[in-house]
Amino acid sequence: MARLPFAAQGSRSRAADEEEAARDHAPPGSVAHLDSADAEQLLDSVGFLLVPGAPLDRSPAYLLVAVRPQPTLSHFDPERVVLWASGTKGPAQTVLEWPLVPPETHYAWGTIEVIDRLGAVNRFASFGGDVSVAKDGDLGAVLFRSDAPIFAAGGHSGAADPLGADAAAFFGVLRATAGNEPRVGDLIHGCSPIALYAAFLERRIAVCEGAQIEGLGTPRLASLLRQERCRLQRENVADQLQGERLAALIRQIASKATEEVHDGRTR
């Protein structure tokens, strides 16, 4: 399988810290493509494999999860996968477990939880994309693919990526704000995974810049995020503008709520 070395390298390219993340850019234009058959081969001796994509690589992001009817007892053995799927009433959590039933073609933004028989969990944060299922005997493979990054958000098998916990928190803000403000829900509904990623970048860059003003934070991470924003402005103009609008609307709503709380306390 000619694509395996690149995919395996991408799965190890998670930044151990922000300085490493700022150094280890993959060459522009490098692309990895995986399908369900590839997923089965890659997962033959592991429980899951992450190819995170941006900001370190320029390939799509992939999360491959093995689901088996019996645990191997030689590594983390996923038993079920909890993801967000788009339903008629909006995104809702759904579960994939053995025997795997092919899900809808697309999955929604949010956290993905990979859980073993003992309840141990590995969490990932994704801005949405395509999902497919393949089975070969007693090995099932769930393949998530996204044009936006998929971050490790921490869990049983390792710490979160530098941006993984931030992305998971961002999704919490999105759901809470959309639940209280229809304008946000309507805008999110029209966003692609890249547009949601662009909105995340806008908010994270603002946090980094505020931290630098106060003498906190790391300039390298802020520089990496700004480079990502510039890339989206070049390569995904419409998505970037949509993300900027979403981030600005959320910021406006949060600012208004803060002012109302302040006014209530001073009266």
Image: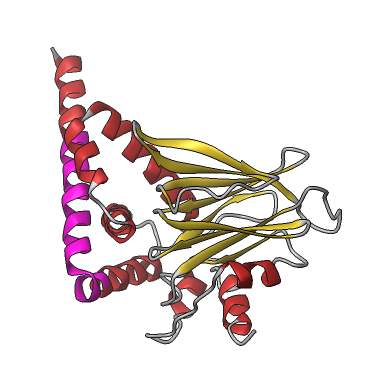
Query: Residue 236 in magenta?
Result: yes
Quadrant of res 250: top left
- Total marks shown come to 0
Rendered location of residue 253, percent (x, y)? 18, 35
- State the residue at coordinates (51%, 74%): 20
Which is the main secondary structure of the residues drawn in magenta? Answer: helix
- State the residue at coordinates (17%, 64%): 238
Above or below, 60 against 188 in this view is: below
Query: Residue 76 in magenta?
Result: no
Viewer-nearest residue: 163 or 184: 184
The image quadrant where one finds the C terminus is top left
Q: Find the residue positioned furthest to the top.
A: 267
Q: Is residue 29 left or right of residue 195?
A: right
- State the residue at coordinates (44%, 54%): 105
Q: Find the residue positioned furthest to the right.
A: 73
The image quadrant where one finds the N terminus is bottom right
Q: Is residue 175 left or right of residue 152?
A: left
Above or below, 147 against 187 in this view is: below
Viewer-nearest residue: 209 or 72: 72
Rendered location of residue 115, percent (x, y)? 67, 44
Q: What stretch of residues is rendered in magenta?
A: 232-255
